[in-house]
Image (cartoon, helix red, strand yellow):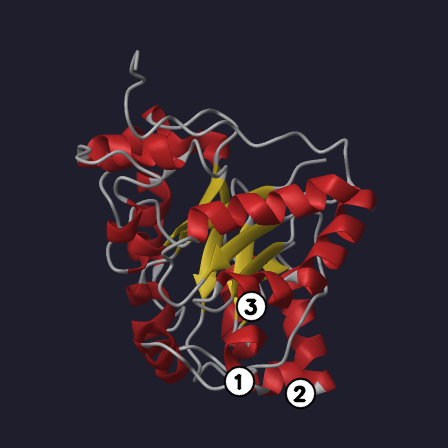
Amino acid sequence: MRLQVGCAMWTHKSWQGRFLPHPLAPHERLRHYAGWCNAVEGNTTFYATPTRDTVASWAQQTDADFRFVLKLPKVITHERRLTDVDEALHAFLAAIEPLGPRAHAVWIQLPGSFAPADVPALARFLGRLPRSHRYAVEVRHRAFFDDPRAMRTLEAALAVAAAEWIPFDTTALFRSPPTSDAERDAWTKKPRVPLRSVALTDRPIVRYLGRDDSARTVEGWQRWVDVVVDWLREGRSPTVFIHTPDNADAPELARRFHDEVRARVPALAPLPQPIPTAPATLF
């Protein structure tokens, strides 16, 4: 029984001097982030496949029980839409090999235009994937949430590879009008889809987007505390990523989510202790 929590990135300007020391060399930032959270979203891999040396450095900065959920490059998911992608896919999977078991899941985020009619392409793609990794799919077309037949068709395709369906919960963001520049920007970019809280595998993954006001973020995730507690009691090992529009307090909020769950599931192991942001002094 394990709960992974994390953020959308492992470094952020607003974290400097608060959650991470400042100044801090780029090759040390992940190590310090891993003192706050035990998982991270690999969003940067969406834009380009990293080199094996870069990925090896990620492994060197993290303990063996740290977990990455790594997004497939956009050339595979958005540009070629899962067709004629063998070369790009093999290059990506080879690049992430140094992570070993730290690679918790390969994240297949599909564009909003990927509709129920495209599910056969997804099924073919999933059916050809090597079983050396776990896979998780995020869809954004509203029909998958509103149409029971489309939902069942997608779930059947995911079952081909024992893949998880990643919900991106933006309901807290859209519950009331934005109150900051970051929230206004998120309103124009984030998907507005109904809440989904069904796990298909023993390793469910949740992306939760709150508000820049931490109290409203915490209020909005209470349903997820209930869901995650139930999953843990069922023997599942969930991963929850905490986002806010500005992500200014995301590491602290991720730890708070873990603390709230652990208060109800005392057998859950605690998170690691953060590395101090400044050296200890005698005075």
* Lateral position of residue 160 relative to residue 273, left or right: right
Q: Residues within 10 Å of mark 2 (few under 14, many from 20)?
A: few
Helix, strand or loop at label 2? It is helix
Q: CA gap, disc 3 to disc 1?
A: 11 Å
Q: Which residue is mark 2?
A: 146
Which residue does the numbered mark 3 point to in the structure image?
216
Q: CA distance from mark 2 to mark 1?
A: 22 Å
Q: CA distance from mark 3 to mark 2?
A: 27 Å
Counting from the top left corner in percent of width and height, residue 35 is at 43, 31
Q: Nearer the viewer, mark 2 or mark 1?
A: 1
Q: Is residue 52 left or right of residue 160?
A: left
Q: Is residue 193 left or right of residue 187?
A: right
- Residue at the front extreme, as displayed: 283
Per the image, label 1 sits on a secondary structure element best described as: loop
Mark 3 / mark 1, whichever is N-terminal: 1
Q: Disc 2 marks which amino acid?
A: Asp
What element does badge 3 sit on?
A: helix
The residue that disc 1 covers is 176
Q: Residue at x 31, y 37 (%)?
A: 20
Label 2–label 1 contact, CB within 8 A: no
Residue lying furthest top: 282
Q: Earlier in the sequence, mark 2 or mark 1?
A: 2
Image point (77%, 39%), residue name: 265
Viewer-nearest residue: 166 or 276: 276
Residue 185 in picture, x, y percent from top left? 32, 79
In the displayed structure, 6 sits above or below 157; it is above
Q: Which mark is residue 189?
A: none
In the depicted view, which residue is nearer to us: 248 or 226?
Answer: 248
